Image: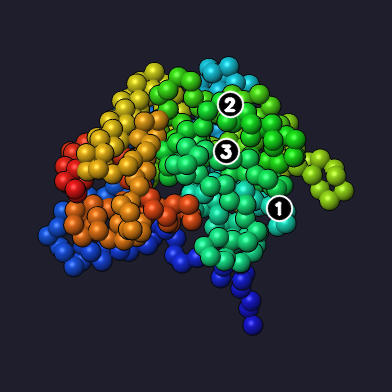
């Protein structure tokens, strides 16, 4: 008899976005003539920019010639891409991150999900609530959660982020080993300030905790006083790992390329108190379980940092931010309380009194043929809220906004 990993039985229902897709597909099947507009799952609508496409075409040609063909690449990623990332995303902001602290991967989702493997099954996990479901679910799979009671897992430390605290996570009153932070946040659209992040870094150093910092949406930050990286914060290299992605920055959702930054000075400890470099452990994990991102894709990612790539991707991001402004304005015109949409591609709506987030989902789909994401799928503190994304086309976003504005 083959036994299963019973931690999987603790997972609550289906994966959030799979359930959104299932309900949407059922509605479309029942209403084949309806024009359903999705502002739900955060996929992009704009194509890869010309600089990226040109670089990938050139790389394809290289792969078709014996003298320039490449097989397996470095587990950490090619030096040309790691150096471009370090120079543009960190050193240009006076942040001391070197190329050899960067690991290229096939997605921030994969990295965030896999990184928890480095830590003990007994590690206490703290995470924002509401939160991107992958943070929680992968720790449930690993056995760190305990059982779920009244919508929350008994061993997880929840950090409520609601309108009452301006969606800012407060320091835990109990010890945590791993802290998941996301800024700009998915789903609330809230970006953390330097002062807020400094509090977390200082707390993590004092408590020998590790911050897993998801900054997949940093390219949407336009406010000059907001940090783009946790490594802009004094001491962060001693306590943090950062995850970034080309998915929303450059439209790589279907192309798959991301990276994480693991500082060499970040340490974790064994049972006897001996320190071990997280950088070396992650390299060991990646070299065992991952064969790297294709050369063609990494050349495309490198082109994002060219002068043409920067101008072209910024134009795309500006377009998504304009979509966010349009949706936010429409929600407010409908009399809804709405947040986010300024330094992030997400708008976080408060559902009308007495209407749950899944009821609001069904109402939006039935009455307006609009798809969003119920806040309850992001955690207990997400109940009573509803997420909408800015990643559709400008034309469909305008149609969606007109429908939404008429919700009154």
Residue at 31 percent of width and 27 percent of height: 318
Sequence-first disc among 2 and 1: 1
Is residue 271 shown above or below 211?
below
Residue 242 point in image, percent of width and height:
58, 36
Few, some or many C-alpha atoms within 10 Å of disc 1 (few <14, some 14-19, many ≥20)?
some
Residue placed most toward the observer, 138 or 202? 202
Residue 263 point in image, percent of width and height:
67, 32
Give left or right: position of 356 versus 305: left
Give the number of the disc on residue 123: 1
Residue placed most toward the observer, 216 or 333? 333
Closer to the eye: label 2 or 1 = 2
Q: CA distance from mark 2 to mark 1?
A: 27 Å
Residue 211 point in image, percent of width and height:
63, 39
Q: Are marks 2 and 1 in contact (CB under 8 Å)?
A: no
Q: Residue under circle 2? A: 195
What secondary structure is marked by label 2? Answer: helix
Residue at 50 percent of width and 39 percent of height: 165
Q: Residue under circle 3? A: 213
Closer to the eye: label 2 or 3 = 2
Residue 168 point in image, percent of width and height:
52, 38
Is residue 120 shown above or below 310?
below
Residue placed most toward the observer, 110 or 296? 110
Sequence-first disc among 2 and 3: 2
Few, some or many C-alpha atoms within 10 Å of disc 3 (few <14, some 14-19, many ≥20)?
many
Q: Are marks 2 and 3 in contact (CB under 8 Å)?
A: no
Residue at 87 percent of width and 48 percent of height: 272
Q: CA distance from mark 2 to mark 3?
A: 16 Å
Q: CA distance from mark 3 to mark 1?
A: 17 Å
Give the number of the disc on residue 370: none
Residue at 42 percent of width and 38 percent of height: 189
Is residue 113 shown above or below 99?
below
């Amino acid at each position: 008899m083959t036994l299963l990993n019973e931690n999987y039985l603790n997972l609550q229902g289906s994966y959030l976005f799979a359930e959104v897709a299932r309900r949407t597909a059922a509605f479309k099947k029942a209403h084949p003539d309806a024009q359903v507009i999705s502002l739900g799952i955060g996929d992009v609508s704009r194509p890869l920019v010309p600089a990226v496409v040109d670089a990938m075409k050139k790389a394809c040609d290289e792969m078709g010639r014996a003298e320039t063909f490449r097989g397996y690449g470095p587990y950490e990623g090619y030096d040309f891409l790691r150096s471009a990332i370090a120079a543009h995303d960190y050193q240009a902001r006076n942040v001391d991150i070197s190329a050899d602290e960067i690991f290229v991967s096939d997605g921030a989702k994969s990295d965030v999900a896999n990184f928890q493997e480095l830590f003990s099954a007994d590690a206490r996990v703290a995470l924002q609530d509401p939160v991107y479901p992958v943070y929680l679910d992968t720790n449930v799979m690993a056995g760190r959660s305990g059982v779920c009671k009244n919508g929350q897992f008994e061993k997880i430390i929840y950090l409520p982020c609601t309108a009452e605290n301006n969606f800012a996570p407060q320091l835990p009153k109990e010890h945590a080993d791993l802290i998941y932070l996301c800024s700009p946040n998915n789903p609330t659209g809230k970006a953390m300030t330097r002062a807020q992040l400094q509090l977390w870094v200082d707390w993590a150093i004092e408590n020998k905790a590790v911050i897993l910092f998801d900054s997949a949406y940093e390219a949407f930050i336009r406010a000059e006083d907001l940090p783009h990286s946790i490594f802009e914060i004094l001491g962060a290299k001693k306590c943090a790992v950062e995850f970034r992605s080309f998915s929303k920055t450059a439209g790589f959702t279907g192309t798959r390329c991301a990276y994480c930054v693991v500082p060499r000075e970040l340490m974790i400890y064994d049972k006897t108190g001996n320190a071990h470099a997280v950088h070396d452990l992650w390299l060991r994990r990646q070299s065992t379980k991952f064969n790297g991102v294709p050369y063609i894709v990494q050349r495309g990612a490198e082109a994002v940092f060219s002068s043409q790539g920067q101008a072209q991707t910024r134009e795309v991001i500006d377009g998504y931010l304009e979509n966010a402004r349009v949706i936010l304005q429409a929600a407010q015109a409908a009399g809804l309380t709405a947040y986010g949409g300024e330094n992030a591609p997400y708008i976080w709506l408060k559902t009308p009194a007495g209407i749950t987030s899944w009821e609001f989902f069904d109402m939006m789909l039935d009455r307006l043929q609009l798809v969003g994401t119920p806040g309850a799928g992001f955690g207990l503190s997400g109940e009573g809220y509803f997420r909408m994304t800015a990643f559709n086309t400008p034309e469909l976003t305008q149609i969606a906004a007109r429908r939404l504005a008429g919700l009154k």
